Amino acid sequence: MMIPPCCIWWRQEQLRDCEMKIKEAIKLAESRWLNLFDIRWVDKSGNDRSWQMVSRQSEPKYFTGQFEPGDAVVVVPYHTGYDKLVVTREFRVPLGDYEYGFPAGLIEKGESVEQATRRELTEETGLTVARFTRISPPVYTTTGISDESVVMVYVECTGEPTSRFNTRSEVIEVILVSSRDAETLCSKKDLKFDAKAWLVILNYAASGKHSL
């Protein structure tokens, strides 16, 4: 939908008059996987404020300008042999329960998005990428508390699912889902879904298309 030019002008004027300003980041805690920061900033009324956030990086991305290529990949695999969407049911420690989602993982240093995708898909499902069909830019998941971003990678895959490549910290079940199965899955309110996966699976249930 097109936005009327007058609305764009008003929004630009509003931003100029009420600009938020980020001043500094103070590191509060550091660990192997996450860093905790207190961000000092100025709100639209000119008041000094603070905001706690976590980052996968040693410094928040705003200060380094390093927003590419993203922190992790989320792989949306479609199995061409079974003609079904590949969904994972994985135990997640913060939930103390199983979550329905897609194969995913951090992009390792020196890896490309494509390399990380191939590695994560095989590690978590035993399947092999046959073709990349779509790769998103970095998208943000929880901007209220983090600058973490993921790249959504849509692929076609082949092979037989197996858990033998899972790490010791992973418990992952691979589920091959038809569009009808997807509709049933999304209707179960007692299940826990990754937000990104739920949207893709819901679209698949409604349209039968595994790629947007």
Image (tube, rainbow, N blue to C red):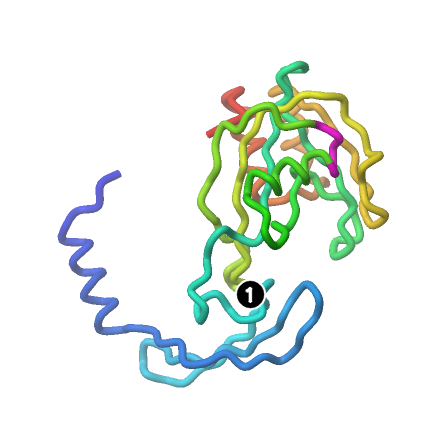
Residue at 19 percent across and 54 percent down: it is 8
Residue 143 vertical position relative to residue 102 in the rendered view, above or below: below
Asked which quadrant contains residue 18, the reply is bottom left
Q: Which image quadrant: the N terminus?
A: top left
The residue labelled by disc 1 is: 145
Residue at 76 percent across and 50 percent down: it is 92
Q: Is residue 166 magenta?
A: no
Residue 85 vertical position relative to residue 195 in the rendered view, above or below: above
Is 26 or 164 nearer to us in this picture?
A: 164
Callout 1 crowding tier (Cα within 10 Å): few <14, some 14–19, many ≥20: few
Is 137 or 116 nearer to us in this picture?
A: 116
Q: Is residue 125 magenta?
A: yes
Task: Tell me: 126 left or right of 66.
Answer: right
Residue at 40 percent across and 76 percent down: it is 22
Q: Position of residue 42 (x, y in %)?
A: 38, 80
Is 106 or 74 nearer to us in this picture?
A: 106
Segment tinted magenta in the rendering: 123-127
User: What secondary structure do most residues of the magenta stretch adopt?
Assistant: helix
Instruction: Give the total number of marks visible in the rendering.
Output: 1
Q: Position of residue 125 (x, y in %)?
A: 74, 32
Asked which quadrant contains residue 174, the reply is top right
Q: Position of residue 105 (x, y in %)?
A: 66, 47
Q: Mark 1: which secondary structure?
A: loop
Residue 128 visible to the viewer: yes
Outermost residue on the front side: it is 110
Asked which quadrant contains residue 63, the reply is bottom left
Task: Tell me: 81 left or right of 165.
Answer: left
Is 6 or 138 nearer to us in this picture?
A: 138
Residue 183 visible to the viewer: no
Task: Tell me: 48 left or right of 6.
Answer: right
Which amino acid lies under the numbered mark 1 shown in the image of this protein?
Ile
